[in-house]
Image (cartoon, rainbow, N blue to C red):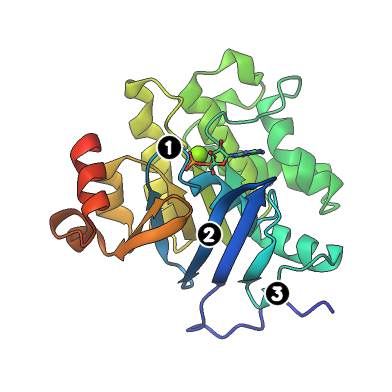
């Protein structure tokens, strides 16, 4: 059964995960993840490599299928029903570590492809919206270039613009600055900060601690497929409850 989107009231969480489990073959990668995300909330996810951070956020737009537990996005339960999956994917944009732009398409066409093909927008409208988004991410002059002609920071800003072109309610970021040279990290974080201020609901896997402190409402620590710490930045960094969180912080700070 498909349920109408927008049926959640303003104070209900936009994402609910209850006891989510996932296996890759025999490997139990998510081992009971329970959390919820409020509308407009910014969640930062940290944790050691291999702890399930990417897998967790990928279950939220069904890039990975979970096998047990419940995920509900804006009132729509994530089931096998493609109508539910499509409804959820319409609400969720994603930005990857490796940008994942289409190399054979111009910057502008990267951004307008899905709005034209999936949303049936007219090319002129789509182009206009894409130019507004490129203004917003600070690179309108790159519209006609190909991704390979751009710096990593510029490519990632195009990837953010491309995700925003589908007008998502939620944006997922999987280590968006990890593949960037240090001098380009800030320009991407600045765009994300601006997006946060605009009220977007965001889940961000990142080890950029300054950014997390400034932007996050809550920080989740993953370890071996479960959330072991969930606290606002100040408490998370100054008074972590779990020894493994303290050890992890001592390695990254
Ligand atoms: P993180 O993002 O925290 O580094 P991941 O969610 O990418 O962790 O991966 C968690 C674990 O699941 C790792 O041990 C990884 O090797 C394994 N894994 C991830 N994707 C797959 C896959 N497609 N098939 C099998 N194992 C996978
Ligand atoms: Mg990862």
Provide the secondary structure element on which disc 2 rests: strand
Provide the secondary structure element on which disc 3 rests: strand
Disc nearest the viewer among 3 and 2 = 2
Which numbered disc, 1 or 3, marks the residue that appears first in the sequence?
Answer: 1
How crowded pointer 2 is (Cα within 10 Å; few <14, some 14-19, many 20+) is rated as: some
Left or right: 183 as drawn, with respect to 117: left
**Viewport quadrant of the N terminus:** bottom right
* Residue 68 image point, x, y percent: 66, 66
Disc nearest the viewer among 1 and 3 = 1
**Alpha carbon of mark 1 to alpha carbon of mark 3: how far?**
31 Å
Q: Nearer the viewer, residue 187 or 81?
A: 81
Left or right: 172 as drawn, with respect to 177: right
Q: Nearer the viewer, residue 122 or 237?
A: 237
Provide the secondary structure element on which disc 1 rests: loop
- Residue at which label 3 appears: 76
**Alpha carbon of mark 1 to alpha carbon of mark 2: how far?**
16 Å
- Residue at which label 2 appears: 31
Name the residue: 65% across, 41% down. Answer: 130
* Residue 153 image point, x, y percent: 46, 26
Name the residue: 76% across, 19% down. Answer: 104
Residue that sits furthest to the front in the current view: 26
- Residue at which label 1 appears: 49
**Viewport quadrant of the C terminus:** top left
Q: Nearer the viewer, residue 120 or 78?
A: 78
- For the residues bearing labels 1 and 2, Cβ distance under 8 angstroms: no
């Amino acid at each position: 059964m498909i349920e109408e989107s927008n049926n959640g009231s303003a104070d209900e969480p936009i994402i609910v995960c209850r006891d989510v489990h996932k296996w890759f073959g025999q490997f139990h990668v998510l081992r009971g993840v329970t959390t919820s995300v409020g509308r407009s909330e910014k969640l930062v996810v940290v944790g050691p490599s291999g702890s399930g951070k990417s897998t967790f956020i990928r279950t939220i737009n069904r890039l990975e299928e979970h096998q047990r537990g419940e995920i509900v996005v804006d009132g729509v339960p994530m089931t096998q029903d493609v109508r539910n999956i499509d409804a959820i994917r319409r609400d969720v944009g994603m930005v990857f570590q490796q940008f994942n732009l289409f190399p054979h398409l111009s910057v502008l066409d990267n951004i307008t492809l899905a709005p034209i093909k999936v949303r049936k927008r007219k090319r002129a409208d789509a182009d206009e919206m894409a130019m507004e988004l490129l203004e917003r991410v600070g690179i309108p002059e790159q519209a006609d270039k190909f991704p390979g002609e751009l710096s990593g920071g510029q490519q990632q800003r195009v990837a953010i613009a491309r995700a925003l072109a589908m007008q998502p309610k939620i944006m997922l970021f999987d280590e968006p600055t990890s593949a960037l040279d240090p001098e380009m990290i800030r320009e991407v974080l600045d765009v994300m900060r601006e997006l946060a201020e605009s009220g977007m609901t965001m889940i961000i896997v990142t080890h950029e601690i300054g950014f997390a402190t400034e932007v996050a409402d809550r920080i989740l620590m993953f370890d071996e497929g479960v959330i072991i710490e969930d606290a606002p930045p100040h408490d998370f960094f100054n008074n972590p409850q779990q020894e493994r969180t303290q050890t992890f912080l001592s390695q990254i700070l």
